[in-house]
Structures are given as C-alpha cells and as structure tokens.
Image (cartoon, rainbow, N blue to C red):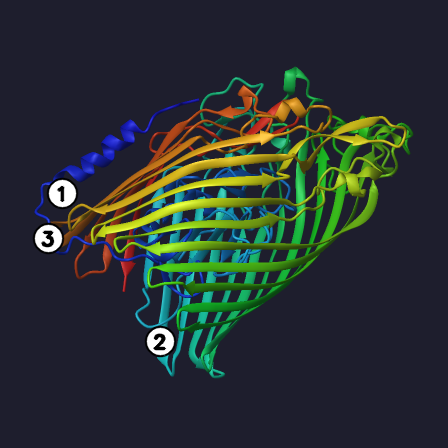
Amino acid sequence: MKSSCALPASLVLLSFAAPALAQTQDETKRLDPVVTTAVPGATPLSDIPMSVSVIGADDLKLAKAYLGAEDVTDLLTGVDAAVANGTQVAFQIRGIGAVDHQALTPGAAAVYADGVYLATNVQTGLMLYDLERIEVLKGPQGTLYGRNASGGAINFITAKPGEGQSRYLSAGYGNFNRVDLGGAYGESLGGGFSYRLAGRYLSRDAALDNTAGPEDAGGVRDEFGLRLGLNWDEMLGGRLLMRTHYEEDNGVNASPRNDSLDLGDHEIAVEGTGTQDTDNAFYGASVDYTRDLGRWELSSLTAFEGYAQQYGFDFDGAPALFGNAALSANLSYDRSFRQYSQEFRLQTDWTGGHTLFGLSASTDDFSQTYTIWCGELDPSTLIGTCPYVGAASRAGPTPVSPTRAMTLVTDINQSRDTLAAFTHNDFDLTEQLTATFGLRLTHEEIDGHGSGRHVFEDGTIGYNNVNGLGLAYGSNTIDETRLSGNAALAYDLGAGTAYASVANSYKSGGFNGEVQNNATHFADEGLFSAESVTAYEVGYKARPTEALTWTLAAFWQDYDSPQARIFVNFPLPDGSSITSNSLSNLDAATVHGAEADVTWRATEGLTLDAGLTLLDTEIDQSSDIGGNAATFDGNPLPFASDVSATLGARYDFALTPGVDASLAAHAKYRGDYYLDPEGLEARMQKGFTTLQAEATFAFIDTGLSLTLWGRNLTDEDYALSGYGFIGYNTFRSDPRTFGVRLDYSF
C-alpha cells in the first residue's frame, strides 16, 4: 500500500501558480461573495455563525469527472466517506458518523437533494449531474435539519429552470473504457414558465484487477440519470417549482479484498460464483411552492423518494480461504423503499431580526431480503453447492432437518413515521451583535418485524435458533420524542465576523437489519439506541480585502452513545450470555479540534485555496460490551484522521487570441484513520495524498471546449470501508483514472 505526503501535490500546484504570480495586480482581482441557503434565506457565507463549506461553479468543473457523491470529499477537510456495497455512502464530518453497511442505518450527516432528505445510506451515493452547488454544514444541525444530523448536513442543489439558464452537451472518454455523456436543455416560454431537462450516462469497465476470477468483480459502471424541472414564477398566487428524477445502475459492484491474501495495489481475488449484476432504480418527485402572505412568506415542500435494489458480491473476499473451498460465502440483497415527506415554513423579516416557524412530517417503508450461500446457487430452491461458513451453528441445537443447513435467508420490514415542529430566530442585539436561537421537537415511531431462516439440503426451511434461545422471528416498536436546537452570537468587526455557538442534534436508533440469529434479535436488547452530539464552537470569518477570505474555527463535541458495529454481549435468562456482531452503542466519545480555510485571488486569473482540519477523538468506554470494554476505551473514532489538508489552484488565461485556457488542480492529504472502533493496527489505513487536475481549452465564439482530466493521479490504493467475516475485508479505492471531455455550450 502506498503512502505519500502532501509535498509533491503542493509542488504541482505551485507550478501552475508561478506564471501568474508575476502579473500586475489590478482592480479586477476580487472574489465573488459566496451566498448559501444553509440558513433561512440567501445569506452571505461570512455572516453565518457556524462552519459551512460551499462547493461552487469552479470546483464543480472538477466534479464532472466524479463517479458519485462520495467523491466530493476530495475537496473538503474534516469530511470523508465510508463506502460499502458499491454506492452505500456514510459521510463522516469531524469524526462523527456511523460506519455500518446495513441500509437501515441512516448516516450521522444528513444528506439532502434539493432540500429533500434522503433517509437511507443507499440513496446518499447519488449520481452527480447538472449541479448548481453543494453545501456542507459542519457540526450538529438539530434545528432546520433535525434527526440524523448529529455530524452535520450536506445538500446537493441542482440547476434550476429559469431565465439565463445554461444549456450544454458533453461527451467524454477515459481509461478503463470509460464513456461519459451528459447534457442539459431548457427554455423560458413566457408567462413566467420555464423548464429544464438534464441527464447523464456513464459506463466503465472494471477498475480493480481480479486475479482469481471474472474481470467484472473489479467493479463495472453502467448507469444513467434523468431530471426534469418545471418552474412557474406566477402560479396559484406564488412561485411553483416541480422536479422529478430517475436513475438506474446496472453495473457490477466491486468485491472486497480479504486481508489474508497477498495482493498488489488495486487487486482483489474472488471466484465467480458471487459476482452478480446490479439492478438498481432510484426515483423521486418534489413540489416546492412559495407565496407571500403580507409580511410573511409561506413555503411548502412536498416530496416522494424511492428505490428498488438488487445486487450482491463475494462476501468473504477470497477464492478459497486457507485453501478450503468450504470457507466461502456469497451474498445478495433485494430491497425496496418508499418515502413521503411534507414540510411547511412560515418566515418573516422584521426590524432587527428574522423569525421562522416550521412543521415537518414524513413516513417511509423499507423491506429487504438478505441471502447468504456457498458456491453456485440454484435460484429455484435457494440451495448452494456447499454450506456457507457458519451455517451449522445458526441452525441451532434442534434443527428441523437432519441434512445440512445450506443457505441463510433473512427478511426485515420497517416503517417509520416522523413529526416535527421547529423555529429559527435571528435578533440584532446591537448594530454589530446578532443572536441566533432555534429549537426543534421531533417525535418518531419505528415499527420493525422480520425473520431469519435456513434452507436445508433436502429443501426443508427452518427458523434460526442460535444457542436454542428461541426462533428468529419477531417484531418491536421504537417510540421516542427528542428536543434539539442551537444558539449563537455573532459580532461584526467590519473586516470579519466573530462567533460562538452551541448546537445539539441526534441520530435515530433502530433495528439490526441483517442476520437474525434467534428470538433476541427483535427484543429490546437487540436494538441500538439513538446517539446525540452537543457541540461548542468559536470562530472568525474574515474578508480583509476583496481578493482574500479566511476562516478559523475551534470546536468541542460531546458524543453520547455513539453507534458502532461491534461484538455485543447479550444476556440470557439463565444469567449467562452470548456474543454477536451487531450495531450497538458505545458509552461516549469526545471530539475536539480546529479548522482553517483560506481563498486568495492572487491575480486576475489565479485563485488559490487551502484548508486544514486538526482532529482529536477519543472513545470513553467503561461498561462491558461483550466483556471487552478495554477494547474500545481510549481508541479514536473510525474514519477520524487527526490531520486532513487540502491545497488547490485555478489559473485562467488567454492561450491565443481565439483560445482561453484554464488549469486547475486540487490535492487532499488524509492522515491515518481506523476502519472500526477496535483500534487494531491491522485495520488502520495509513495516511495518503490524492491529486486531481484538469486542463480546459475553450474555443472563443464556438461554444466548444476540450478538457483533459485526471483523478487519484498519485495512484493511491486505500480502504473505503471494512468489515469482519472470516478475517477482515475491505472495499478498495479506484486506481489512477484520466480522460478527455468535449463540451458544447449553446
């Protein structure tokens, strides 16, 4: 595994900067103010009393080479993503985020698309196309964003129909036979009506090298997306924006790598029986309506989101562990999800302040069938050619058949209803001092039921009964009410704003959605509880000149009951216990650190930016979980690098009288991080640096531009996430990728 420092990337960036530094500075050397909707109304970033990062138009040019939402973390410090099972993404913000592969586990960083909450981690790896900007809010967001925002929130905002909208076509080709097509078209048709249609198609051969079986196990991309927006500036006395989208993913998810194998960079080794095509569809629609009611503004956001998903892979990450073909397991998922949400906001500006009141309601339904088998699977009988490893123990002491247990089938169904009321208020205490105060009251009810069973060699089907503790089926309900909120003071110092804030949010508890061993699975002790984060932050946002902005922030976060996938000690009626790998809760953790960001328009054509996050996290575990409190106590949180840093440059210049050029590069260094809370050296990813770059040549008055791009130019091989099963398995990063793209704007 490679390890590198940030210095080589820095030299590349400085080489871009050198020609421009000699230019004469003039009055055109200024940065455009960044405006965000992270708080009510469009607000300059420098006026918001919390840490917010906005990825705008220039950086989104780099994002045209991205595969999915997780790639945007390359542009941010203190933000990372644990990626599993293809496109399941759990974003980590300042070390906060549950690292778990089951779809029932929501992220601790709430992810939104055009203001619509995406309730499962299956949706958060969304396909990126036709974006306007991305907003990243760091720290708990318990007022406007509510539940599952204990680490922060990320909002992907797509381009809107309207006057002056861009229209374009693009076509690209890259290594691994990558084909990338996209475009957007829209018009304003009078009467305040406009529309916009955008789409993207992406295909690519396997990027990882499978040394033991089919090439496709290295991860094949075959996906497309379409989005339609309809906008009426005058409709029903207000403004109406309707959006609908549909995406498909028909590739092959990359298999993991087992740590017992001696493999090179970007290599895996799995045999073919677990390699499966994906059949994933994501869809949704929303209606955003706003109108004025005297001095007040009323807004309504009605939305539907859903998906149907089928995929699988070689679960053990090896062709024959320790030379034994019976130590093998393949898995598949079959999921469906529906989510309906409604939010109303009523807000007004008044002399010396702003007030917002809101109501939010949502309901969702999730179902999943999870299958594990060995060898070739007969789809009509669900029997493999060998028993998967661990089958005999799950069948229990009195199996329903004298033949061998062969295949595990687990079903779970969950419904969730949520209702919340919230308020957000700004008060001008003096001309320079502003106070912010918000509260949110959330009630949530989660109902779950399911079963775990085995298919035996003779076709008999029986419920799991590990340790004879009762058949593995049941149901339960989680019902809780939570209060969250924030308060802040901001002081305008003329050239900058100083602020201090406190904020709280929580992440829901729930059911373990995969292997159900016995009757304890749906009992209270088999559930995981909600976690919560209370954060304290002080900071300063400066704009000393029109060409320079910088921010500093220091923070402390008290993390109560962090959710983690660990080996848990379940008590039994006779006073004994069993240990099972489950999503559960640690006692507590603390997170503290500091951040700095700077953007400088060094000359008319050259913009430089840099960021740094220093982080210290520590788990505080005194109670025994499976008798192993010492395993976790004092360890850092997963995916919490003690240092992350970015360095970027963009240089725009006239190459010839007929050609404008733009050179851009962005490097990110991630320090060492652990893949789970056990803190084992074997499960630590060493620090590394990634570099992305592009060169664009725009042919004046033609609308045509040609871009050469590259990602992970340092060719780092690093772990995206990991899990324990017959050793330890990790999902791996893509190697160096590069390509060319032709764009036509009209």
- The numbered mark, 2 or 1, whose residue comes first in the sequence reads 1
Q: CA distance from mark 3 to mark 1?
A: 13 Å
Q: Position of residue 225 (x, y in %)?
A: 48, 56
Residue drawn at (44%, 68%), measured in percent from left and top?
354
The span from disc 2 to disc 1 (Cα, nearest Å) is 40 Å
Q: Nearer the viewer, mark 3 or mark 2?
A: 3
Examine the rendering and report whether any part of residue 468 can be seen.
yes
Q: Quadrant of the N terminus?
A: top left
Give the crowd class for mark 3: few <14, some 14-19, many >=20 residues within 10 Å: few
Q: Is residue 377 above or below residue 308?
A: above
The amino acid type of the residue labelled 3 equals Asp
Q: What is the x, y in percent for residue 595?
A: 38, 40
Q: Amino acid at mark 1?
A: Ala
Residue 149 left/right relative to 596: right
SS of the residue under disc 2: strand
The residue nearer to you, when weighing 131 against 17, is 17
Q: Give the residue number, with chain letter if any, for mark 1.
A: 20
